[in-house]
Amino acid sequence: MALPTTDTRTLNTLVSATLDTYSGDPANLVDEGGFKIFGKLARAGRIFAVNDAERVEHPVMHGADGESTTRYVGTEFDGNPASNNLGVAQAEVLSKALFTIKNVTTNLNLPQELIGRPSQLAMTEVQALTKRKMMNLLAEEEYWLLRGVGTATGTEAIVDPFSGDNTWAATNGSMSMLGLMGTGKITNTEKFANIDTQDAGDGDSDWAPQLYQGSTAAMTDLDEVIQDFQDSIIDCSRFGGIERPTDILTTVPIYNKFVEALREKTSINDAVVRNLGVESEIPFAGVKIDFSHHLDKDALWDITAETTPEHPVLMLNLNSLRMNLVYGGDVTQGGGFVKRVSDVAPHPTNTTFFARLLYKYCYSLDNGRRSFGQIEGWTI
């Protein structure tokens, strides 16, 4: 027997309204949920609404123009300085980094008892179920970004962001930190976002992330810990402007080692002291150092050889890394990035109902990859 029309319309409306509420303001949702990397992206204003398309493209702005400047004094009436470099040469600026948009679909399951319940009573339960679903989806996306898999545990993986890249797969997430930090470092012909790191051909040597060898004495000499952090941050910031790291994300053991090194000092900056017991982010050398429970020691973080299990120490440029959410159409008309793509309907063989959900997203780098980096070699 068909559902009563009134019940169907009510449940569809309730589901759509709660989806719009929770997915219409992702910055507030990730902050409320306590998500580590998403919270940083939200606070940095790096969650963007984009139009529905196959991919996101960003121009690669590395390279110099084809000629040098001409300098002269203004009293040269003939307008023809002795050293005239004016010409028509121009470096190519049309190369683009490509990031494939992924579709994600899932069911929002609802108990059968909601049928016939007054809407004011059903609303509370639909809100709770929808919010929990959104939290679960964001948690899974954070696993994919940090670990390269959709779970909090298990073997980590290299995931690249474009369909033509070496480790791209339709069933993966958009990309992983292992892909961001490692693709192209061992084999420079491997592509990340459709660009390799070769100097010739279609490559771009400035598209490679930085890799620093941590001191072998750092894990026993606390001064070396601080020195390694400082040296790598300064070196990774040499490109100027917005091509510099803003955050460092690492494992809990390395984070604790850094805190231990700070506490050994007789005096440290007031801002650092204020954060040590209250917040996980520690300001240091112009960046914020933090930990993630989802980062683990793994041989894949040995970028050079992939043989020795090492702790990831990731320098991130949140002026470049961004999360793109497809809203579709005119986003000023409201609605969230998670869409209900079916009416609420009963499962054929179960006592539950469901609504099919869909969202589209990808991560991308819009201000270069060379300002990302990793400290390699720490194995405690």
Image (tube, rainbow, N blue to C red):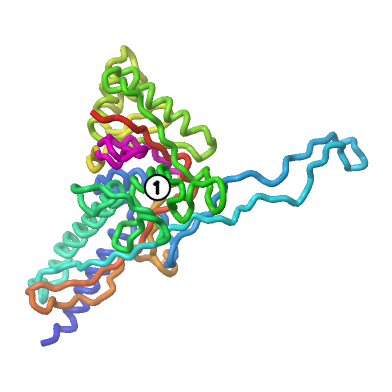
Q: Position of residue 367 (x, y in %)?
A: 50, 46
Q: Position of residue 345 (x, y in %)?
A: 17, 77
Q: Nearer the viewer, residue 169 or 121?
A: 169
Q: Nearer the viewer, residue 348 or 148?
A: 148
Judged left or right of residue 84, residue 62 is left
Q: Position of residue 347 (x, y in %)?
A: 13, 76
Label 1: which residue? 183
Location of residue 24 by image quarter: bottom left
328, above or below 182, in the image: below
Q: Residue at x 37, y 46 (%)?
A: 41
Q: Residue at x 30, y 37 (%)?
A: 312
What quarter of the picture does the N terminus occupy?
A: bottom left
The residue stretch that appears in magenta: 298-319
Judged left or right of residue 234, residue 282 is left
Judged left or right of residue 56, residue 340 is left
79, above or below 376, in the image: below
**What is the magenta segment's predominant secondary structure?**
loop
Q: Residue furthest right?
A: 78
What quarter of the picture does the C terminus occupy?
A: top left
Instruction: Work out whether residue 228 can be spotted.
Output: yes
Q: Residue at x 22, y 48 (%)?
A: 155
Label tally = 1
Is 305 colored magenta in this rendering? Answer: yes
Q: Nearer the viewer, residue 87 or 200?
A: 200
Q: Residue at x 29, y 67 (%)?
A: 358
368, above or below 314, in the image: below
Q: Position of residue 291 (x, y in %)?
A: 27, 36
Is 242 colored magenta in this rendering? Answer: no
Instruction: Work out whether residue 49 can be spotted.
Output: no
- Badge 1 amino acid: Thr
At numbered mark 1, what does the secondary structure look like: helix, strand or loop? Answer: loop
